[in-house]
Image (cartoon, rainbow, N blue to C red):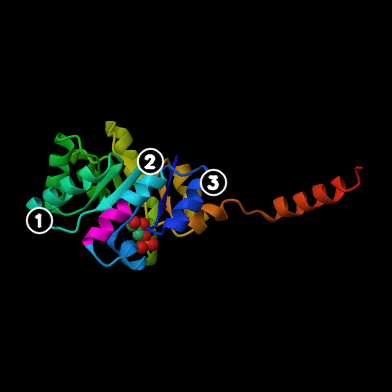
Amino acid sequence: MKFFIDTANLAQIKEANDLGVLDGVTTNPSLMAKEGIKSNAAVMKHYVDICNIVKGDISAEVIATNYDGIVAEGEELAKLHEQIIVKVPMIKDGIKAIHYFTSKGIKTNCTLVFSAGQALLAAKAGATYVSPFIGRLDDVSTDGLQLISEIRQIYDNYGFQTQILAASIRHAMHIINCAKLGADVATCPLNAITDLLKHPLTDIGLEKFLADAKKFV
Ligand code: G3P
């Protein structure tokens, strides 16, 4: 299972990367805005900065919602760095654009996926990754993990190579359950990753070992 971090915060990206368990980064316009980035040029530079920190796939999202615009923006993003994955929304023109990018060898991440049907379309178009938003489904009383399970079954039935990138992850149990269900990737906030470290018996056990180690001369 690959771990991506879902942020545009360079300090958090560096911290996760230093742990040695990071395989990539996902961003979106909301995460960029949260970092106080105020121009398209600054967004582009930020993508390159992220690529220079993490050796893995870095999702960069298009803003256009029409086919020509998505293609133009995606080609520009793909030229920024070899690690860039063009993130395209799950809309009709997005699916057409993903098909085009696939034919040109440009990798894609189909985002804002909330149903198995949408995930099937993304795979048919040749998306490299599909991003089901499990936390946002949970927010509206719908089982986000059930969607991961359905997509896994459909992709396995037909051997689709599109990787399931579980997104909108809110906590450590989301990561563990996504791993159990066979998601290929989890993109997580830093705290969800570091929360995987925690167990009170580890803390108690370490305290005892260290106390006993003091008995040695
Ligand atoms: O990157 C997209 C997704 O992970 C957003 O998560 O927490 O805004 O629902 P969230």
Residue 41 in magenta stretch: yes
Between the C-alphas of marks 2 and 1, the distance is: 28 Å
Q: For the N terminus, give its image quadrant.
A: top left
Q: Callout 2: 10 Å neighbours few (<14), some, many (20+)? A: some
Residue 34 in the image: above or below residue 77: below
Which numbered disc, 2 or 3, marks the residue that appears first in the sequence?
3
Q: Residue 16 carries which label?
A: none
User: Which amino acid type corresponds to the residue marked 2 in the rendered image?
Assistant: Gly
Give the residue displayed 36% in from the left and 50% down from the top.
50
Question: For this view, does 177 lie left or right of residue 209?
Answer: left
Single out the mark in the foreground, 3 or 1. 3
Q: Name the residue under label 3.
A: 19
Q: Over which residues does the magenta segment extend?
A: 40-47
Q: Which quadrant, please, contains the C terminus?
A: top right
The CA span between labels 2 and 3 is 14 Å
**Which quadrant of the figure shows ligand 1?**
bottom left
